[in-house]
Amino acid sequence: MKNEILYKKFKTLLESKWPAVSSCWKQIRDSFEIEEYIKNDILLREGERDDRVFFIVTGGVRHYCIDIDGKEQTTDFCVEGEFSGTFNFEMSNIPLSEQWIAVFEKSIIATAEKQKITGLLTSDTVLMQIFNDIIASYYKVKLIREKYLLMSDLDSRYSCFEANHSSLVNRVPFYQIASFLGMTPETLSRIRTRSGCRY
């Protein structure tokens, strides 16, 4: 019964973003496993086979790399209603992950093997259109981030982060946000003080 409740949440969220999902829900449900996770659970480690895709039903995850000095560099955050993982679906040569994916708060996450997703896409035109929409949305977000990270001053980076990721400000540690924005935690603290942040 509990698992059915989790799947219902999954279905409701998918349909709120892509209503056409209702016509192929059974195939989607049969392809995904859904589980609850706690803070700091690891979904994917660097060097592991990158053969799964994740959908965040509730909660969120952080993507990061670890440099030669053991320092973490946050590369992405994914929250409820978003997919996590890479979009490399080349099944003949499954790559090894170049990053870590970790849960940053209690979460419900649906997981599917990329091979199953590939099978669905080749057999259902509705799902293929949804997948194309997801890819387009993913790259739009990626371009926005690259613009404010590479072309903006430090204050503007944080302002843009607040505007586009306001739900994350009170959900993840500031040092992770600072890493994501390409600055030190001390610099982020000064920026927040200048902007009058009280939280």
Image (cartoon, grey):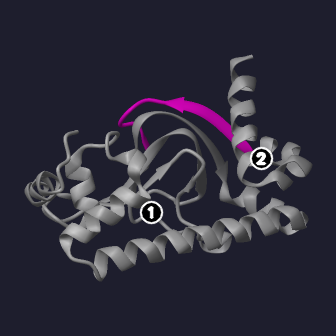
Provide the major secondary structure of the magenta segment. strand
Which residue is identified by label 2? 15
Quadrant of the image occupied by residue 12: top right
Identify the disc placed on residue 97. 1
Quadrant of the image occupied by residue 110: top right
Which quarter of the figure is the N terminus placed in?
A: top right
Q: Residues within 10 Å of mark 2 (few under 14, many from 20)?
A: some
Disc 2 on helix, strand or loop?
helix
Q: Residues within 10 Å of mark 1 (few under 14, many from 20)?
A: some
Task: Tell me which residue sits at (34%, 75%) in the image.
Answer: 148
Quadrant of the image occupied by residue 63: bottom left
Which region is colored magenta?
32-42
Q: Which is more foreground, mark 1 or mark 2?
A: 2
Q: Is residue 4 magenta?
A: no
Q: Earlier in the sequence, mark 1 or mark 2?
A: 2
Left or right, 137 with reference to 37: right
Residue 72 location (% of width, % of height): 23, 56
Q: How many numbered markers are drawn?
A: 2
Task: Tell me which residue sits at (21%, 58%) in the image.
Answer: 178
